[in-house]
Image (cartoon, rainbow, N blue to C red):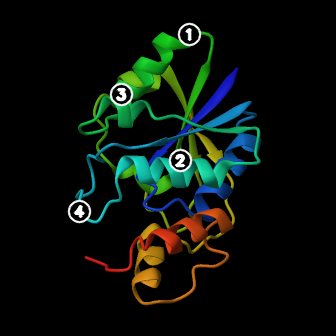
Amino acid sequence: MRVGLLGGTFNPIHNGHLILAEQAREALDLDRVLFIPTASPPHKPAQSILSGKDRLRLVREAVKGNSAFAVSDIELKRGGISYTLETVQALHKRFPGWKLFIIIGQDMLAVRWRGWDEILKICRLGVAVRPDAAIKIKPPAKPIPMPPIGISSSEIRSRVAAGQSIRYLVPNAVEDLIRRRGWFKTQK
């Protein structure tokens, strides 16, 4: 089984995440893409982040209807700062028959990852192509072609706080939950 790992804060998940997952599924010939919401991201401040339970619910709603997409709460259950190394080690141990692929954006190649060399011993690397990225994709990383998508979670939070529409930026079920729960009405 070829499984792509797409981790993120998903605060909130949006259509850009879903497009990336589908593009990665095709480019890397994946059987499944596993969305993994972080407990606490190591590279972002934890302020203004919905609870793990709420973000997990949004991700589950977003991937409903796509049998190739699944959601894992492995990092939320572990708690603390979410390091990819710990996650891939745990998944590799639990599912030794899986061929794991980390899915990242080209901009994340510039980030200093804890245990990067060890991650690459366990996983293959799929990188979403971003034409404006300063760092080039080099083998053995496999490029994931991406259409230009100008959607970000921070933009969605700002739009909600300003009372603007987020329709077509997020799946309908995600928009409905955000509106009903009143999430992101105040931007910090």
Whether label 2 touches label 4, CB < 8 Å? no
Q: Residue at x 27, y 56 (%)?
A: 44
| Rendered image: mark on residue 85 | 3
Q: Earlier in the sequence, mark 3 or mark 4?
A: 4
The answer for how far apart the CA atoms under marks 1 and 2 are is: 28 Å
Q: Amino acid at mark 2?
A: Ile
Q: Earlier in the sequence, mark 3 or mark 2?
A: 3
Helix, strand or loop at label 4? It is loop
Rendered location of residue 166, percent (x, y): 57, 79
Q: Residue at x 59, y 47 (%)?
A: 60
Q: Which residue is mark 2?
A: 137
Q: Residues within 10 Å of mark 1 (few under 14, many from 20)?
A: few
Q: Which residue is mark 1?
A: 96
Q: Residue at x 58, y 70 (%)?
A: 175
Q: Earlier in the sequence, mark 3 or mark 1?
A: 3
Answer whether residue 136 is visible to the viewer in this image.
no
- Which label sits in the foreground, 1 or 2? 1
- Which label sits in the foreground, 2 or 4? 4
Q: Amino acid at mark 3?
A: Leu
| Rendered image: mark on residue 144 | none
The answer for how far apart the CA atoms under marks 2 and 4 are is: 32 Å
Q: Amino acid at mark 4?
A: Gln
Q: Earlier in the sequence, mark 2 or mark 4?
A: 4
Q: Earlier in the sequence, mark 1 or mark 4?
A: 4
| Position of residue 68 in the picture relative to residue 185 (left or right) | right
Q: Residue at x 76, y 45 (%)?
A: 66
Q: Quadrant of residue 15?
A: bottom right
